[in-house]
Amino acid sequence: MQRSVAMNLRQALTLRKRNQIFHHISTRQQPCDVFINHRGTDTKRSVASLLYDHLCQFKLRPFLDNKNMKPGDKLFEKIDAAITGCKIGVAVFSPRYCESYFCLHELALMMELKKKVIPIFCDIKPSELNVVQGDGRIPSEEAERFNQALEEAKYTVGIAFDSEKGNWSDVVKNAVDIVIESLIEVEEEEERMLQPASNHFSCTHRALMQLQDPRKL
């Protein structure tokens, strides 16, 4: 009798653990809301991580490589999937951004997929964004693609930030407000496309509206 009870208990614990694992996997694989494109050596420990943390506080699902990726993940596969599934992109431009193939690839893919991209020009002017060639980091066949993406970013209204004069918390708060407003716009557009005659908002849309102004609901 005791042995049977022990076996049943063990099976119940095993099933519970398995369900927890499946729940963890399904949650982890949800598409992200916001893809944070940045040069790690410049901004990972500052604006990129702060932005990620603030967006998480609002129950949003941002993607930041060192937060969302784990050992064994295929780099391009994981990042490209996150960009494809995201609703908004935030491109944090910095002095060494254009030296990185990965940064430029992510930006180009967001532009090609017609994602709304919010630029943050951190210690760099839009006119200074140019593909760095000649050092072997950027393949010549990709240079035109990357330059087209940079040109589009240059002429997109963004947030300018000087780290010597500005406050990190101010720029992050400003960016979060813009992201939430942009997500609401994307949700509204998706609602119009899917249910043009309906006045019902999605759960995500309602949550975003409440974040922006609880009195609107």
Image: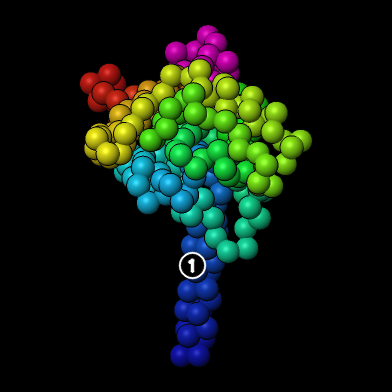
Q: Position of residue 166 (x, y in %)?
A: 25, 35
Q: Quadrant of residue 202?
A: top left
Determine whether 99 is above or below 183 in the image. Answer: below
Q: Residue at x 50, y 69 (%)?
A: 17
Q: Is residue 27 visible?
A: no
Q: Is residue 129 visible?
A: yes
The residue segment tinted magenta is 187-201
Queried whether the magenta region covers residue 189, the answer comes back as: yes
Q: Quadrant of the C terminus?
A: top left
Queried whether the magenta region covers residue 31, the answer comes back as: no
Q: How is the image coloured?
A: rainbow
Q: Position of residue 71 (x, y in %)?
A: 58, 64
Q: Quadrant of residue 103?
A: top right
> Which residue is situated farthest in the bottom direction here?
2
Q: Residue at x 36, y 42 (%)?
A: 47
Relative to 87, is 207 on the left or the right? left
Relative to 17, is 161 on the left or the right? left
Q: Residue at x 37, y 26 (%)?
A: 159
Determine whether 118 is above or below 105 in the image. Answer: above
Q: Looking at the image, which is closer to me, 13 or 176?
A: 176
Q: Position of residue 145 (x, y in %)?
A: 69, 29
Q: Which residue is denoted by mark 1 in the rendering?
A: 16
Q: Residue at x 50, y 80 (%)?
A: 10
Q: Amino acid at mark 1?
A: Arg
Tell me the crowding category of disc 1: few under 14, some 14 to 19, or many 20 or more residues within 10 angstroms, Cα based. few
Q: Position of residue 26 (x, y in %)?
A: 55, 51
Determine whether 111 is above or below 73 in the image. Answer: above
Q: Looking at the image, which is closer to me, 67 or 5?
A: 67
Classify mark 1: helix, strand or loop.
helix
Relative to 178, is 72 on the left or the right? right
